[in-house]
Amino acid sequence: MSEDTTQNEAEESAIPADVQVNDDGSITLGVAGEASEAVAEKVERRVGVIIKPDAKYNSPVVAKFINCLMLDGKKSTAERVMYRAFEEIANKLKIDPLSVFETALDNAKPLVEVRSKRVGGANYQVPIEVKGNRQQTLAIRWILEAVRGRRGRPAHEKLAQELMDCYNKQGATIQKRENTHRMAEANKAFSHFA
């Protein structure tokens, strides 16, 4: 019995001070004062499930992008490609690559998309507004499709070029976004089915 008590005390002492264990067993992270405002501000970026920020830029969005870039569980390779792409962007544009990345991602996010809806035996392409998480997911997916579609150059160069194209509002990803918006505009008559 005393072993169980000492084990529970050891487990409780291993929990950091800013972590609160609720009655139902869930965990709440708490940060007091000015730090909580900074954390709340950083959480504003949509990353889905809580993702640890990447090591170099301390950005959860970059960490999510690296995770999506990763193939066959080779995270170190994906990180190397991402960071080399950032170095190339910094060398070519002479500005902060993180701001280029975030602007490129914002430029690639779609505002509306079409979804197929069956009404009375007919299928209609109904335009709907895209929510924040899905906007980010689609932007990342489209950028990576465009990168993987390019041939003949190293991955970090292709990624850097695609991010710079998105930053300048051109390239395959922006074209895909414009096509999605155009399709939604063409089917605006069916928006009452949403």
Image (spheres, rainbow, N blue to C red):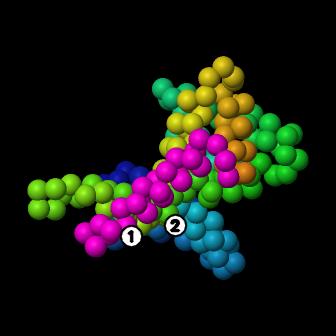
**Side of 168 where 174 appears, left or right:** left
Most common secondary structure along the magenta stretch: helix
Does the magenta-highlighted stretch encompass residue 175? Answer: yes
Residue 5 appears in view:
no
Give the image location of residue 74, x and y in percent. Answer: 55, 27
Give the image location of residue 28, x and y in percent. Answer: 46, 68
* CA–CA distance in space, label 2 to label 1: 11 Å
Number of numbered discs on residues:
2
Which residue type carries mark 1?
Asn
Position of the C terminus by quadrant: bottom left
Would you identify the image quadrant in which residue 183 lies? Answer: bottom left
Q: Residue furthest left?
A: 121
**Magenta stretch in the rendered image:** 169-194
Give the image location of residue 147, x and y in percent. Answer: 60, 34
Which residue type carries mark 2?
Leu
* Foreground tag (2 vs 1): 2
Q: Tag 1 or tag 2, which sits nearer the N-term? A: 1
Give the image location of residue 95, x and y in percent. Answer: 85, 51
Closer to us: 169 or 10 = 169
Question: SS class of the residue under badge 1?
Answer: loop
- Whether residues under marks 2 and 1 lie with C-beta atoms below 8 angstroms apart, the answer is no
As drawn, 99 above or below 83: below
Q: Which residue is mark 2?
A: 29
Would you identify the image quadrant in which residue 42 lies? Answer: bottom right
Residue 149 appears in view:
yes
Q: Residue at x 16, y 56 (%)?
A: 122
Q: Which residue is mark 1?
A: 22
Q: Residue at x 69, y 23 (%)?
A: 154
Q: Residue at x 69, y 22 (%)?
A: 153
